Image: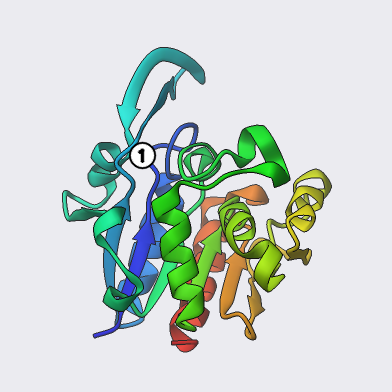
């Protein structure tokens, strides 16, 4: 059975992985006959109260929080290599650009968590597909933009697209229920909640994105 890594960044849209996106990715992986391998970095981050949408002053751990989505079946990303996987998918949520990298604060000047960057570079060097959902293409662009110049989408937000392109990546406008496939670099992306007005739209786009990722294996 093909193994698809799922890089999580916590649990919750404001400070971790967007839960709908993560669950739809896991569902799509299973429906397409592959096995999900969930992982996250062991790193602390500022907690956001998802009722008030304000930071609480407390900290949480990305690996511990992501374990909630993975039902406890999760690995520290430092223990995972490209040799363990056939493909990898990154759900969105602000955790992708706050915990996996600092794109939310620094845009094109973002630095990426070293273990996340390592795994993405390993996957790319091995010619193994990478899927990125919602804002997560920013992580891929920060790692691979300069060397690979991948074509990605975050939907149609001009400001975010401009920052992506400063990394060396190319942005392509895309509707929420579709995806952009850079087949030369084996990178697939879909806008999800960067554009979605309905949860069903998110599900449709992610399902198509993951199906294409697995087709590229």
Q: Quadrant of the C terminus?
A: bottom left
**Residue pictured at 28% horizontal, 63% vertical:** 80
Q: Nearer the viewer, residue 44 or 31?
A: 44
Residue 142: x and y in percent read: 62, 54
64 displayed left or right of 144 = left
- Please identify the quarter of the rendering in which residue 123 is found: bottom left
**Residue pictured at 66% horizontal, 61% vertical:** 176
Q: Is residue 77 above or below residue 57?
A: below
Q: Is residue 89 above or below residue 181?
A: above
Which residue is farthest top? 57
The residue carrying mark 1 is 11
Badge 1, how many Cα within 10 Å: few under 14, some, many 20+?
many
Secondary structure, mark 1, is loop
- Please identify the quarter of the rendering in which residue 132 is found: bottom right
Residue 35: x and y in percent read: 26, 74
Residue 202: x and y in percent read: 54, 57
Q: Quadrant of the N terminus?
A: bottom left
Q: Is residue 164 above or below residue 35?
A: above
Tell me, yes or no, if residue 97 can be seen here: yes
User: Which color mode does the image show?
Assistant: rainbow
Q: Nearer the viewer, residue 146 or 101?
A: 146
**Residue pictured at 53% horizontal, 75% vertical:** 208
- Please identify the quarter of the rendering in which residue 164 is found: bottom right
122 displayed left or right of 172 = left
């Amino acid at each position: 059975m093909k193994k698809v890594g799922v890089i999580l960044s916590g649990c919750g849209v404001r400070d971790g992985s967007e839960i709908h996106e993560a669950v739809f990715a896991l569902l799509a992986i299973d429906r397409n006959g592959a096995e999900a391998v969930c992982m996250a970095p062991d790193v602390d981050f500022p907690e956001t109260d998802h009722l008030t949408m304000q930071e609480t002053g407390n900290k949480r751990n990305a690996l511990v929080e992501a374990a909630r989505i993975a039902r406890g079946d999760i690995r520290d990303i430092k223990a995972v290599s490209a040799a363990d996987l056939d493909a990898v998918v990154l759900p969105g949520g602000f955790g992708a650009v706050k915990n996996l990298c600092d794109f939310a604060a620094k845009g094109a000047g973002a630095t990426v968590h070293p273990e996340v960057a390592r795994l993405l570079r390993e996957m790319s060097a091995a010619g193994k597909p990478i899927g990125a959902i919602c804002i997560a293409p920013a992580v891929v662009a920060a790692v691979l933009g300069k060397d690979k110049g991948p074509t990605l989408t975050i939907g149609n937000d001009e400001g975010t697209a401009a920052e992506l392109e400063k990394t060396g990546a190319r942005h392509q406008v895309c509707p929420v229920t579709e995806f952009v496939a850079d087949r030369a670099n084996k990178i697939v992306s879909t806008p999800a909640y960067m554009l979605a007005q309905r949860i069903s739209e998110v599900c449709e786009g992610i399902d198509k994105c993951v199906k294409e990722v697995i087709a590229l294996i």
